[in-house]
Amino acid sequence: MTDEQARDGRAPDESAPARTWSGPALVVLTGAGAALLLGTAVFLGLVFLSVAPPNALSQKYQDQVDGLVYPEFEQNWKLFAPDPLQQNISVDARLRSAAGDGAWVDLTAQDIAAIRENLVPSHLDQNLLRRAWDFYDGTHASDESPIGQRGELAQEYLKRIALQRLGRTLDGAPVTGVELRAATVAVAPPPWSTQHWSTAPQYRQLPWWPVSPADYGGLS
């Protein structure tokens, strides 16, 4: 009942038609809702298969699961069997241009600085570089050659992260190469543990990767 109807003592107009959707609009809305539900179900199903124990379904659709999950949605755990990190890995990078080689930049330290004392740290700061290095490590042979298409993808992914962090020029000249290295330190056992292992850092330095303007495509 409107204010005018209340002052005049009139009853609300019950003859006003209720809002209705046309047939084509209902078809579009129903189709869009069904597509969203189907897409969500497929996505969650494939992610579930990626962390579930090996089974006939996950083996049959392994290529589709890998195509969706890697590298952006890779999980660092398995269903019913979490696998906590046991190492601290620090990743450095440096650039090369016609002006020479640049100094090493600690990319991991940048992430730690962004996370420390931050009540709502970014998921990218916490996991992007760390998972990219883990992805690279699992898809390359001891001589740093990529294993299959996933290895090439991991190498390109890691390279583009470094280029996005370090920029397009070095000392005024376009970047022509990028190099990465990592220092890995095992997490020490707790004082009450009877286990013992070395906590000395282990270093791994990758070869120089060539850089072209195309490598910066899509980077901010």
Image (tube, rainbow, N blue to C red):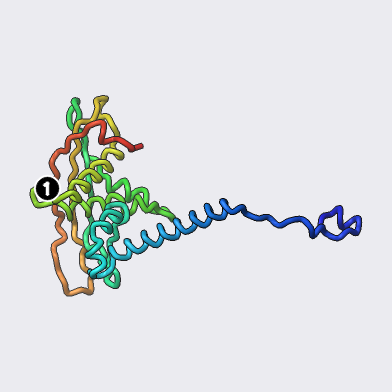
| In this rendering, position of residue 17 left or right of residue 127 | right
* 1 left or right, relative to 159: right
Q: Quadrant of the C terminus?
A: top left
Residue 145 at x, y = what percent? 11, 47
Which of the pair 4/151 is nearer the observer?
4
The residue sitting at 21% across, 38% down in the picture is: 94
Residue 183 position within the rendered picture, expressed as x and y whole percent measured from the top left: 18, 51
Residue sitting nearer the eye, 118 or 61:
61
Check the image and name the residue furthest to the front: 23
Q: How many marks?
A: 1
Residue 21 drawn at (x, y percent): 62, 54
Drawn side of residue 114 relative to residue 36, left or right? left
Splitting the image into 4 quarters, where does residue 53 fall?
Answer: bottom left
Q: Residues within 10 Å of mark 1 (few under 14, many from 20)?
A: some
Give the residue type at disc 1: Glu
Reading the image, the residue beneath label 1 is: 144
User: Judging from the image, what secondary structure is the residue with disc 1 in?
Assistant: loop
- Give the percent coordinates (x, y) of residue 101: 18, 32
Q: Residue at x 81, y 57 (%)?
A: 13
Instruction: State which quadrant residue 198 falls in.
Output: bottom left
Is residue 141 placed above or below 198 in the rendered structure?
above
Residue situated in front as seen by the camera: 30 or 110: 30
The residue at the point 20 percent across, 31 percent down is 176
Residue 162, quarter of picture: top left
Q: For the view shown, which residue lies furthest in the left direction?
A: 143
104 or 135, which lies in front?
135
Specify the quadrant that holds the N terminus: bottom right
| Position above or below: 152 against 76 | above
